[in-house]
Amino acid sequence: MSVLELKDSYQNGRDNIGRDLIAPCLKECALYRRGTGFFSSSSLRSYADVLERFIAAEAKIEILASPVVSDQKVVRALEFNQNAEKRKVTISKFSETILLTAIGFKLDPSRIDYQSRLLSYLIATGQLELRFAIPRYYDWPHEESVNNGLYHVKMGYFNFGEKSQVAFDGSFNESLSGHTGNVDRAQVYRSWIEPDVSRMRGIINDIDSDWEGSNPHIEVLELSKGTIEIIKQLSPSKRPRRDETHKPDPRHPEPPKTGYEISDELWPHQRSAVKRFLEKKTGILEMATGTGKTRTALEIIRILINSGEIGSVIVCTYGTDLLDQWYDNLLRWQIEEESHLSKRLRLFRQYDKYGDALSFTLDSENSVLLMSNNDPVKLRELLSSTSFNKDKTLIIHDEVHRFGSQKNVEMLKGLHLGFGYKLGLSATPERVYDDGTEFLNTEVGETIFEYPLEAAIEDGVLCEFDYHAVFFELGKEDKKRRQGVYSRRAKAAKEGNPWTTERLYIELSKVIKTAVNKPKELEGFLEQHSEMLISSFIFVADREQGAEVCNVLNRFSVTYKTYYSGEDQKYLDLLSSGEIQALVSCERLNEGIDVRSLSTVVLVSSSKAKLTTIQRIGRCLRKNPEDPSKRANIIDLVLFDDEDEENADSERMDWLQSVSKTRRKEAI
């Protein structure tokens, strides 16, 4: 190559780093390797402009960048990730999301701009390779740490023919503003200038060490195979030009709208459930916890979107944990199903700190809204809105049994009539103490498909389990409280206000749930079986009982955390990773929690409602790919008292003992 006429240093304003340093080197080099401290979708897209003007046809560009973790969702997620592996996964997903956003993943193909097409083409062909760097020593305790702890290198080098090299060190990021706009500087070192050689080699060695992952102070993350595959699917077959009109790539045609073809990757029971719903268009799928209700619903969405039957989806359920899990599932599903989806769906959220309901109603086409059922006033506004086409909308009520509350019955009756498709999901939709079941059947539909625990265990979808009944008796104070219940019932009847049977059940259950002898009997059982506490959920009636159970756990040196309302989601990660052995909770773990390594559920407190029991034991019946021989344990505190005319514990015991005898019939 001809010797480049390069200066010792460059400064934007006086010079133009992009034009005077980067451009001439890119035109001549075979390799450009760069470490940079800034990475975002906007910088990537602007960098595409740099590449379009300067890149040589044969040049390979390798960029090692730091994700700028300022997005509050990611900061919050990182605060929950208290081990290095979980943090790495979160940051990797965040980085890849930024990249997919930059190449127009969420846009309709006809709206993807030139920069995005160029970027996807360069990555797909291997001409541009991106990796991400994060510090290894991080514990991410606070937002300040997240923002300050970056891979902040701003060096790079060019390799030319005949062993010629140029290295630089400066303040500019790999972005359009860094190349031209910001007041940035770059110091240059050239292989043909003897005084420069030592500094140049030092920079090259540092960058190579970082890129290859041999620097012990940083973790280097590469793009996943799934993300690269998505980019290849989106990439044009030949290098795009700025002045050309974008047309669909014949190499990657739009997926055909195949109507009601159900994926072969689903379990047989899921395929049956999908088929049944598509026939009925409305109704409830009653599927045991852990048998893939969410995956079934996603397949229904895919088919209805591809066939043009719907243009939008509303998912309603309770609790931030479960709504966040839906959001993550939808993101991952769109990436995994990219080649099988005719449209990319935008995601809106109306819960916790998110307020996207209005945006959804104003432009609902190709969109999904995740909506909390905790606010019936806001839900009424949505269901009453005429701003979106309900006839072309699928509304999903996950954990639909909870939707039948008295408040919802009063405020939302009749508001589902206009929806084209209505889907309910639940382990069992029956409500025990009120008339909410009738409301659900009218608004959402009747149960149209059933897949109970016994069938799931027989099919090998859920694992087998052993049932351990631990008997307790009521103490003197408990018996006084129970007698008080019957006395109040008799008094009410005498005054002309007789209790319903449901009222009696509820009052008696309060006594049994908090019986004083339960912790003592649990301790006696654990003296012989403490190993069962490894990877366990322990359900208690209230915090006071939880404190007593925690005292029992202390005697067995069990590492545990309480998981009541408002406590940190990171504790689920700690349990999954084995850093703690047990979580003590009241109701928060009932729904939507997927910890496949969980081996034991302890029912210190139970509800008469069969649904609650199914949900709770279902937490530990999920198959664990890392432990194919997994067998779960259910430890159940059961009242031993012949005087109790309404002993729901004995009914639950008989049922669980029966289910525990179920055996797998054949391999799936």
Image (spheres, grey):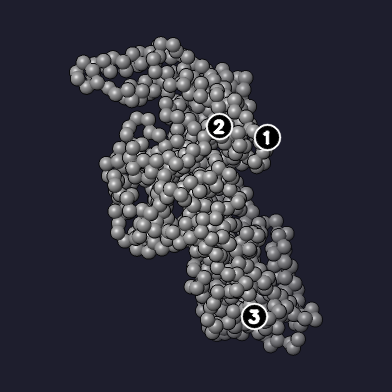
Residue with the most extreme front position: 279
Q: Which mark is residue 629?
A: 1
Instruction: Determine whether label 1 and label 2 are within 8 Å by CB.
Output: no
- The mark that comes first in sequence, 2 or 3, is 3
In the image: residue 236, left or right of residue 485? right
Which residue is at 75% across, 72% downward? Answer: 201
Q: Where does residue 312 sit, x and y in percent of width and height? A: 42, 58
Query: Callout 1: few (<14), some (14-19), or many (20+) C-alpha neighbours within 10 Å?
Result: few
Q: Can you say which quadrant of the picture contains the C terminus?
A: top right
Residue type (three-letter) at the residue carrying disc 1: Ser
Instruction: Determine whether label 3 and label 1 are within 8 Å by CB.
Output: no
Give the label, 3 or 1, closer to the camera.
Answer: 1
Query: Callout 3: few (<14), some (14-19), or many (20+) C-alpha neighbours within 10 Å?
Result: many
Residue type (three-letter) at the residue carrying disc 2: Glu
Q: Secondary structure at mark 3?
A: loop
- The mark that comes first in sequence, 3 or 1, is 3
In the image: residue 39, left or right of residue 507? right
Q: Is residue 14 visible?
A: yes
Q: Is residue 228 above or below residue 397?
A: below
Q: Can you say which quadrant of the picture contains the N terminus?
A: bottom right
Residue nearest the viewer, comparing 94 with 384: 384
- How far is the residue under mark 1 from the one under mark 2? 18 Å
Residue type (three-letter) at the residue carrying disc 3: Ile
Q: Is residue 546 above or below residue 438?
A: above
**Which of the 4 quarters of the picture holds residue 128?**
bottom right
Q: Where does residue 664 sit, x and y in percent of width and height? A: 63, 32
Give the label, 2 or 3, closer to the camera.
Answer: 2
Residue nearest the viewer, comparing 390 with 476: 390
Q: Which residue is mark 2?
A: 454
- How far is the residue under mark 3 from the one under mark 1? 55 Å
Q: Which residue is mark 3?
A: 55
